[in-house]
Image: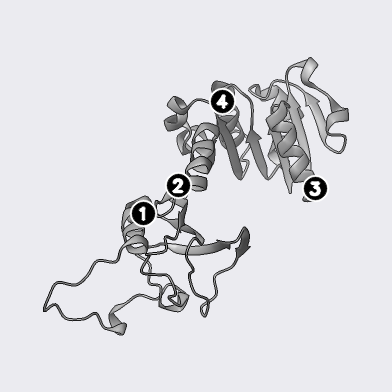
Amino acid sequence: MRVAIVGAGNVGRSIAKELLQNGHHILLIERDPNAVKPESVPNADWLLADACELDSLEEAQLETFDVSIAATGDDKANLVHSLLAKTEFGVPRTVSRVNHPGNEWMFDEQWGVDVAVSTPRMMSALVEEAVTVGELVRLFTFREGSANLVELTIPEQSPVVGMPLRELHLPGDAVLVAVIRDGVGMAPQRDGVMEPLDEALFVVSPEFEQVLADQLVQRARPEPGAPAQSHEDRETWL
């Protein structure tokens, strides 16, 4: 995969190194001559240019890239580059860094942003994920699908503890994508069971997040005299 990364600061270089290890072709675009340090990421291509100018992006042949990542510390620059990459060069996937939470609302498809990565929000989510049990934590937002990656650490009193995953019926479009147990990630298995303090990762639309959290933490009891729900009435998640 061909990936263009705008901004060769600490963030941009770190992303480049990680993607290079995974076998991808990387171009780093940086406008500050003092920040162009090819020896720091020797296996990447480097271009000294302003990634917010059409001429520079034409020189970079941006239309030949699969992904463009705007990773500068300037939200305005990240937005302008993402818009040009998507509308002028037809880059299939654009990822943009959000530096200031107050600007997050602008990082959407209207500005050519497919995925917005908010550093403050992500750090906050990771802190919450590390210290909370029984609370749903939003880790990541998928812009195109209007879905979120969320995490919930299963409390000991959860009604799903000990329940075979084949019997776990999730609300709406919620999907269990992974279970982290004792620090080890596992794909969900139909015959597996949920254990206390499992970290369960779901992809779910925002409108079903609270319903999902309520189901995993405390299952509502039926009213006295209410008919029991039959197996046929349930929706299977696998």
Query: Which comes before the other along the chain, label 2 or label 4?
Result: 4
- 122 relative to 69 in the view: left or right: left
Q: Tell me: 7 left or right of 115.
A: right
Coloring scheme used: one colour
Residue 157 is situated, as x and y percent measured from the top left of the image, at: 37, 64
Which amino acid type corresponds to the residue marked 3 in the rendered image?
Gln
Image-based side of 97 in relation to 235, left or right: right
Mark 2–mark 4 distance (CA, rounded to whole Å): 27 Å
In the rendered structure, are the residues bearing label 2 and label 1 in contact, judged by CB atoms less than 8 Å apart?
A: yes
Q: In whole angstroms, how far apart are the C-alphas of marks 2 and 3?
A: 28 Å
Q: Which residue is mark 4?
A: 80
Q: Quadrant of residue 227?
A: bottom left
**Which residue is more in the foreground, 20 or 160?**
160
Which quarter of the picture shows residue 70? top right
To which residue does mark 3 refer? 21
SS of the residue at dot 2? Answer: strand
Asked if the residues shown at circle 2 and circle 3 are in contact, with their CB atoms under 8 angstroms apart, the answer is no
Residue displayed at 28% across by 79% down: 233
**Which residue lies under the disc numbered 2?**
138
